[in-house]
Image (tube, helix red, strand yellow):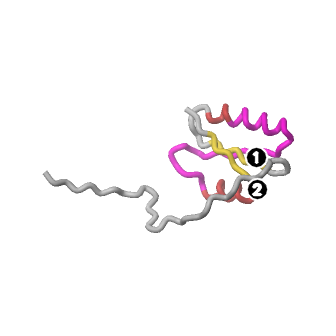
Amino acid sequence: MNERLTMLDPTAELSPAKRPRLAPPARLSGLTVALLDIGKARGDVFIDQLDTRLSERGLTVNRYAKPTNTKVAPVEVAQAIAAECDVVVEALSD
C-alpha cells in the first residue's frame, strides 16, 4: 500500500518571520520584568514565588495572564508587555 502523508503547519504561516534572537540583558537592575501566567495548573504558584524573589531584589515586576492555556495571549496582553516591560518570564507548570 502506498500512502501519502501530508504535514500541516498549525501556525498557518506561509513564510514565517525569521528574526535573530535578542541577547539577554547583562543585568536586571533597573529593568521591568513581566511575569506571564499562561494558565497552566499551579503556574500562579510559580509566578507568586518569582514575584516575591524578584521584588526582594528591588526589581519592578508586572504580572499578566492569558485567559486560557489553550490559546495564544491576546494582542492587548502582548502589546502591554512590549510597551511596559523590558524582559518577560512565562510560567509553565503542571
Left or right? Give the position of 47 relative to 92: right
**Label placed on residue 48:** none
Q: Position of residue 14 (x, y in %)?
A: 44, 67
Left or right? Give the position of 42 relative to 30: left
Left or right? Give the position of 72 relative to 15: right
Which region shows up in magenta? 47-74
3 vs 67, nearest the viewer: 3
Which quadrant is home to the C terminus? top right
- Taking the spot 83% from the left edge, 44% from the top edge, the residue there is 59
Identify the residue under disc 2.
84
Looking at the image, how many numbered discs can be counted on the residues? 2
On whether residue 33 falls in the magenta region, the answer is: no
Q: Position of residue 37 (x, y in %)?
A: 64, 42
79 vs 51, nearest the viewer: 51
**Label placed on residue 62:** 1
Q: Is residue 64 above or below residue 52?
A: below
- Taking the spot 50% from the left edge, 65% from the top edge, the residue there is 16
Instruction: Give the image quarter of residue 47.
Output: top right
On whether residue 52 falls in the magenta region, the answer is: yes
Amino acid type at mark 1: Asn
Q: Position of residue 67 (x, y in %)?
A: 59, 45
Tell me if mark 2 has few (under 14), some (14-19) or many (20+) residues whose alpha carbon lies within 10 angstroms of its own.
few
Q: CA distance from mark 2 to mark 1?
A: 8 Å
Amino acid type at mark 2: Glu
